[in-house]
């Protein structure tokens, strides 16, 4: 009951911030739209006409997933310095609320930006490929793939935030792989179309399997490892990442309660 009250308070405060910082949210949405257009239109310039619609959909949903992941990771891991600078970490520790649980609430901000930006860019893409943009082979797998990307990104961002608090380094400074995830992580390129060496690396990453589910949900493209195998791997990764994140958060929280928190610098 106490945990539920804390969780409700965290959801309430992050939802309240959406309204108070509406212009910042609007700016993030506009930036997202520009990134979508730059990546999408650039990627589709040299696609043959006979494959244009299919590749447009693959590229569109790949960029959507990459942006969702990037927003969530950076908004969670990058918020650590703000929480420390304003004294919110100590305030939550005093009230027996894990500051990392509070930071994880930034998922609300990141997912809100994506939820608003996706329909807007879809409207723009109606002019590019027409109503084909609304193609959906299986809504259940499309939603499952997108949710897995959000959950993976949240757990990863929270792990970076925890390590940032422990190492006194901004969480975002620990992340060097987000920009490579579009291709290496299989978000934008089907595994079957990758070079063999890159394919083996991609299959080791959780985002790849979430993206395979998304592409199956949109176009019915059979995952490289088979649908059932990809589902099993995706769930296994989710459980493993959850346990790893919980372990790291528990260790870091224990350290903070003993040694306190220190400011994290970020240019």
Image (cartoon, rainbow, N blue to C red):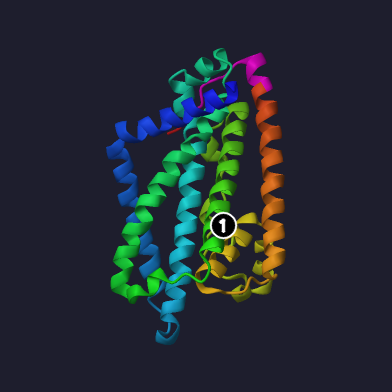
Q: Nearer the viewer, residue 59 or 210?
A: 210
Task: Measuring from the top left, give residue 124's x and y in whole percent.
Answer: 29, 65
Task: Measuring from the top left, give residue 122's x and y in whole percent.
Answer: 35, 63
Task: Measuring from the top left, give residue 199's x and y in whole percent.
Answer: 66, 68
* Up/down of 39 relative to 251, above or below: below
Q: Nearer the viewer, residue 180 or 14?
A: 14
Q: Is residue 189 visible?
A: no
* Numbered label tally: 1
Could you tell me which residue is drawn at 30 percent across and 44 percent down? 27
Mark 1, Cα crowd under 10 Å, few <14 / some 14-19 / many 20+, is: some
Secondary structure under tag 1 reads helix
Q: Is residue 126 magenta?
A: no
Q: Is residue 146 visible?
A: yes
Residue 165 placement: quadrant:
top right
Q: Is residue 20 left or right of residue 248?
A: left
Q: Is residue 94 left or right of residue 33?
A: right
Residue position for label 1 = 144
Residue furthest toward the front? 1
Residue 242 placement: quadrant:
top right
Q: Nearer the viewer, residue 36 or 209?
A: 209
Quarter of the rendering occupied by the C terminus: top left
Q: Which residues are magenta?
A: 254-265
Could you tell me which residue is drawn at 60 percent across and 56 percent down? 207
């Amino acid at each position: 009951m106490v945990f539920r009250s804390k969780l409700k308070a965290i959801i309430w405060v992050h939802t309240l911030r959406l309204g108070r910082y509406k212009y910042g949210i609007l700016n993030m949405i506009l930036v997202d739209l520009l990134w979508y257009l730059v990546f999408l239109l650039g990627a589709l310039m040299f696609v043959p006409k006979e494959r244009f619609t299919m590749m447009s959909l693959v590229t569109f949903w790949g960029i959507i997933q990459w942006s969702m992941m990037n927003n969530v990771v950076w908004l969670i891991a990058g918020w650590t310095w703000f929480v420390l600078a304003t004294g919110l970490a100590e305030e939550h520790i005093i009230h027996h609320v894990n500051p990392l649980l509070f930071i994880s609430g930034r998922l609300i901000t990141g997912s809100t930006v994506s939820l608003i930006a996706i329909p807007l860019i879809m409207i723009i893409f109606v002019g590019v490929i027409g109503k084909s943009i609304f193609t959906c082979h299986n809504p259940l797998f499309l939603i499952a793939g997108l949710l897995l990307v959000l959950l993976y990104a949240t757990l990863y961002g929270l792990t970076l935030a925890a390590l940032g608090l422990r190492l006194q380094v901004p969480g975002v400074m620990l992340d060097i792989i987000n920009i490579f995830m579009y291709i290496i992580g299989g978000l934008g390129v089907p595994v079957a179309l990758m070079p063999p060496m890159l394919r083996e690396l991609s299959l080791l990453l959780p985002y790849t399997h979430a993206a395979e589910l998304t592409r199956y949900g949109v176009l019915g493209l059979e995952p490289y490892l088979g649908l059932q195998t990809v589902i099993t791997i995706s769930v296994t990764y989710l459980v493993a990442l959850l346990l790893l994140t919980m372990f790291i958060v528990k260790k870091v929280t224990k350290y903070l309660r003993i040694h306190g928190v220190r400011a994290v610098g970020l240019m």
